[in-house]
Image (cartoon, rainbow, N blue to C red):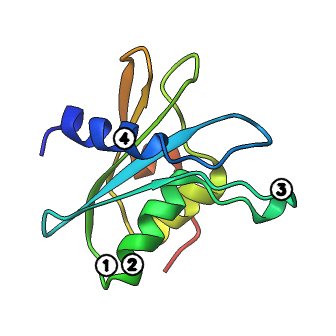
Amino acid sequence: MTDEELIDIARQYRKHSYSPYSRFKVGAAVLTAGGKIYGGCNIENSSYGLTVCAERTAIFKAVSEGEREFEALAVIAGTEGPCSPCGACRQVMADFRIPRIIMANLRGEVKTASLAELLPFAFGL
């Protein structure tokens, strides 16, 4: 699985975004160590604190199916530069030790970072 293929899957999941309040559509795809891919989109709620990001949706779908080992996660949105995960998503990525995060935007800009680069002092197990 190439980075571009994982980004394309994230782009497809972005189309399912439920974002009537912010209109900020995000898609994500997580690749497991076994080669399976789980996708997700952001899902908003009128009580903003209950909103779930695309990255966490994808990770939680994978975990709910028994996955615990991951290779990479791609996230894409209509941002100025590559879409960077929020702090809550970074912490979830840290808990599941996702080593490589691929950040992209709709213009084709891509930046890859390690989890340590995104969250250098992660709280965790």
Q: Are marks 1 and 3 in contact (CB under 8 Å)?
A: no
Q: In the image, which disc is placed on residue 48?
A: 3
Calculate the distance from the C-alpha at mark 2 to the C-alpha at mark 1.
6 Å
Where residue 32 sits in the image (x, y, percent)?
23, 65
Res 121 visible: no
Determine the residue positioned at 27% across, 65% down: 70
Where residue 55 sits in the image (x, y, percent)?
49, 54
Q: Are marks 2 and 1 in contact (CB under 8 Å)?
A: yes
Residue receiving disc 4 = 12
Calculate the distance from the C-alpha at mark 4 to the C-alpha at mark 1.
24 Å
Give the mark nearer the N terminus: 3 vs 4.
Answer: 4
As rendered, which of 74 and 99 lies closer to the eye?
Answer: 74
Q: Are marks 3 and 4 in contact (CB under 8 Å)?
A: no
Calculate the distance from the C-alpha at mark 1 to the C-alpha at mark 3.
28 Å
Q: In the image, which disc is placed on residue 68?
A: 1
Give the mark nearer the N terminus: 2 vs 4.
Answer: 4
Determine the residue positioned at 53% across, 62% down: 56
